[in-house]
Amino acid sequence: MKNGLSALLLCVLASGVQAQQPDGGDLIKRGDYLARAGDCVACHTSKGGKPFAGGLPMATPIGTIFSTNITPDKQSGIGSYSYDDFQKAVRHGVAQNGDTLYPAMPYPSYAVVSDEDMQALYAYFMQGVAPVAQPNRDSDIPWPLSMRWPLAVWRGLFAPDVKAFQPKTGEDPLLARGRYLVEGLGHCGACHTPRSITMQEKALNNDQGSDWLAGSNAPIDGWTASNLRGDSRDGLGRWSEDDLVQFLRTGRNDHSAVFGGMTDVVEHSLQYLEKDDATAIARYLKSLGARDVNQSGFKPDDSVATALWRGDDSKTGAAWYVDSCAACHKTDGSGYPRFYPQLRGNAVVLADDPTSLIHIVLTGNTLPGVKGAPSSITMPAFGWRMSDSQVAEVVNFIRTSWGNRASNSVTAQDVAKIRKDESVAAHLGAADVEKLK
């Protein structure tokens, strides 16, 4: 599932469907907003396809699953679904005919959604979305994994019947709202919580342990999801609540900038969040303790910056950094706030798993323009002109300069493995890797 909280703005008039009464119109409008928070468009819209008409391929450990058509078309969509059919599919992964759906959707997360919000979502998808006659594609999963009945057993063991959300006694209402959005429709844990060998999330909320939102333990579409807990090195320990609100609504702040799958989340969802909801999410995330309370924090060190200022690029990878990176990120790694993110002390740079950093060096990335920050900033790809060993050198330079203390080194073999990943290779251009060696 692509990382957390996004959906597409679809108004009732644009879809050609209008509500019959004011109350219904308000319910549809509310459902539209909640569909954004639920990230519905991210999975249920294929590239270049009609909104919510399905067909998006999703790579999973058991094969490729194609998302389904959730427009109100009666033949290929969910137009014949009653409210009970709808809530069973969303909350429990059970189709109208009783079949178990593949466990790609975050059913335990959506199970906490209130009945009031579920009714609004149903009204929106039935009356606020244009029907699209697009048949669903069969998933490409080999037998016997293609059989659906074992999934009912999996669901019973690892996706328990989670109850609707309830605030805790004496809980700050704003924090409770944030917890509801993060645990529920936002389904942040689907990407940002590590999974067990049997593919279930190791925790569904903070009460189940500090694995909750501690970062993914395997790449998703070639990216690793960040630690959202209070760890000082690779988490959000050094971010303020205001830093988080700014990041959620604009995809950038003085610490970092959005990348990978989260660019879609910010572009199609988070920028549209009401300020109170963004603040609620930020407050909840800042309430989470560190996964590793003994983790040492970042301490700046200017020795590398001083050496580069003096023209000394003898450190391995320094010459490549000066040639390819320093113009935007500066020789001291401080970058330009809210345009080119700082690399010194950046939690993504300091993470134990360097996959995301390698990926972005290979393929580049675009920071989308949004309402609160209209400038779109693009980092070019370097995989077409850097060999695996050269990428490894510059990544190691970044991870060990300016006070950065990475726990492990990147090898050319690590880069080669990521370069071959389908989600990465598609964005490398026409490089002749053999000539780069």
Image (cartoon, rainbow, N blue to C red):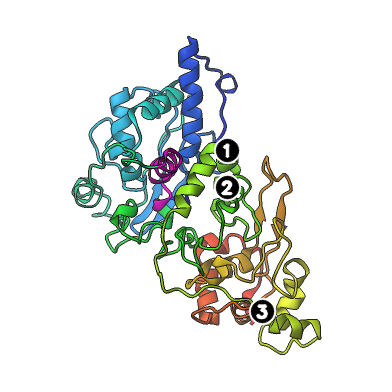
SS of the residue at dot 3? helix
Region in magenta: 172-189
The residue singled out by tag 2 in the image is: 245
By secondary structure, the bulk of the magenta-drawn segment is best described as helix
Disc 1 + disc 2, Cβ < 8 Å: yes
Crowding near the residue tagged with mark 1, few <14, some 14–19, many ≥20 C-alpha atoms within 10 Å: few
Please state which of residues 2 and 179 is positioned toward the viewer in this rendering: 179
Could you classify mark 2 by the number of other residues whose Cα lies within 10 Å: few (under 14), some (14-19), or many (20 or more)?
A: many
| Residue topped by disc 1 | 275
C-alpha gap between disc 1 and disc 3:
48 Å
For the residue marked with disc 2, what is the amino acid? Val
Residue at image x 53%, y 80%?
Answer: 410
**Residue at horizontal 48 percent and vertical 45 percent from the top:** 281
> Is residue 185 a member of the stretch shown in magenta?
yes
Between 237 and 156, the one nearer to me in the picture: 237
**Residue ID for mark 3:** 436
